[in-house]
Image (cartoon, helix red, strand yellow):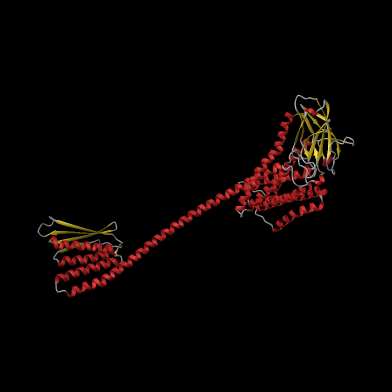
Amino acid sequence: MRPRLSPVHVASRLAALLRGLLLCAFVVLCLPCRAQADPPPVLLEGELRILTSAMAVAGPELSFPADRPATKVRLPDDWWASRPKADGPVWYRLTFDAPAHPDRLLAAYIERVCSNAEVHLNGHLIHSGGRMTEPVTRNCHYPQLVTLPSGLLRDGANELDIKVMGYALQKVSTRQRAGGLSAVKVGPQAVLEAEYASDRFWSLTVLEVITVGTTMLGLLVLCLGWLNRREPHLLWFGLMTLMWNVMAMRMLARDLPFDNATVELLSGAGWALVTALGVQFMLSYANLRSRTLEIGLTLQCLVVPLTLVLAGPNRLFVVMSAWQLVMVCEAIATMGLYLYAIWHHRREEFWPMGITVVSMGALLLVERAVQHNLLDPLRLHLSHFAMPVVFVVLGTRQLRSFSRALQDAEAARNSLESRVAEATAEMERNYAQMAELRVEQVTEKERKRIAGDLHDDLGAKLLTIVHTSESERISSLAREALEEMRLSVKGLTGKPLPVADALADWRAETVLRLGQAGVEADWRSPNEDLTQQLSARAFVQTTRILREAISNVIKHSGASHCKVRCTLVNTISCSSCRTTARAFPWNSMASSTEATAWPA
């Protein structure tokens, strides 16, 4: 049996795991950004020329302002580092050598430009990414591939002017949204198209696929939560996933109908809503609820956009960074409370959910480190690709838990149905028995009525005939009919009687009748104690059979002796009558009659 770990050991393991994740993230993020010497203005990489130096000058002119002093800058040029408080547009002039009539079509590849750019080749406009005025087209996550017309190329030095429209760091909510320009690659278009397709696939297509997949997952979980109101964490998880995807759509949406200040304000309000939904999901999944916390999260969703409005567009990054730090602290505290709750109540879920939750916390910390300039930004927005994976893991567990609960409910329903079927069958059996009992009661009542009518009407008339008839034969027949009637009435209304009493009655009647006819009776019956009961109907039928047998002996046999034997075999009482005729020897002729009666 494995020993149970104390909360101290659990906390130490989680801390070690978190430190490991942060160290790995730090190494991965920082190794590509280690300090290097300034590269030459042009780097050669196979057939490609990488332009890493440019002359920059700010200005809204329609062409590069050659009459104004320009500053030499190194590419990539991030405005949050080189121009921390300045907006665009900014002109960049890059120079490269090319033949006047190259044998292959050339192109320029811009990996990142934020927010939008126009490209001029030797003073001629050859590419525009969209609107350069408010609302500016947002191409921060879209690489740009620009074909260089052969007719505009010069033999020798060529000038590539790029006009970039972007925003200062103070006017955006995240560091990745600040203006800037990456290094520019010039070379054969066929070679650059492959790199462009690869970068576009990993930065946009994968994000689109993930967004569609997690949106379907969120809608499914949301529907399950709506149908099953007793599981509110499903509802919160579905809303959180959908809201996260709405925020991720900012990377895919290029032309929005709002200016930059409105977009960033909505973005800040959206992150506050995502945080509130995430905290509610964690608490409800741990079966915890706090009305005070719910009110606080609701107020936070209202206060965040209000503070951004009051701070103004020139202090948006500072205010939003402070709020995001508060939100990250809230999320990490909620994760810790969730892990503490499942450690005490659902120990089997602790480690898989602990790894998932710690990974989520590590991603949030890395994102905060990037926003506070502790780590250099990656080419890919890490949280927008890794967090959906976490959502898929959480959503899968939600669906698995719901499926298990559904199976348990189905098993309980089947068990209930079987119990209801058993109860129904039992009720039907009871109803059938009650119906049979009712029929028996009615039949018994009817029998008693018929017996009463026979006794009161027919019996009285027969008794009158017996006492008033002058014919002895008629009186005798009436007396026999009266006895038969009484016997029938007894069969209809009589109660079961002991077999011993029935044998005694049969013996008395048989000996009496045989004696009156001058026949010697030899009656033998069991001597042991008899405890069986004989029903009234069986008694009547057996009596009639025995009377008929004795009548046949008296009227037709001419016997002088009559032997009557009564036996009890397998709870069955049997009577046998054997007679011997006078005119023949004792054993020359015999007749036999048997009667069988079943005990009650």
- Determine whether, in the image, residue 80 is placed left or right of residue 6: right
The vertical placement of 494 against 254, above or below, is below
- Seen as rendered, the residue at the extreme left is 583
Residue at 24% across, 66% down: 504
Q: Is residue 16 above or below residue 440?
A: above
Residue 60 versus residue 192 in the image, above or below: below
User: Residue 233 versus residue 220: which sits nearer the camera?
Assistant: 220
| Residue 47, position as x, y percentages in the image | 76, 26
Q: Which residue is drawn at 21% across and 72% down?
A: 462
Q: Position of residue 529 (x, y in %)?
A: 28, 63
Image spot of residue 229 (x, y percent): 61, 55
Split into 4 quadrants, where in the image is the C terminus? bottom left
401 left or right of 142 in image: left
Q: How many marks?
A: 0
Which residue sits furthest bottom? 468
Instruction: Please tell me which residue lies in front, 59 or 205.
Output: 59
State the residue in front, 522 or 102: 102
3 on left or right of 497: right
Given residues 374 and 342, the one toward you in this image is 374
Question: Where on the picture, by quarter, is residue 196?
Answer: top right
**Residue 568 visible in the shown view:** yes
Q: Residue at x 81, y 39 (%)?
A: 164
Q: Can residue 46 be seen in this view?
A: no
Point 58% across, 50% down: residue: 405
Left or right of 507? Residue 238 is right
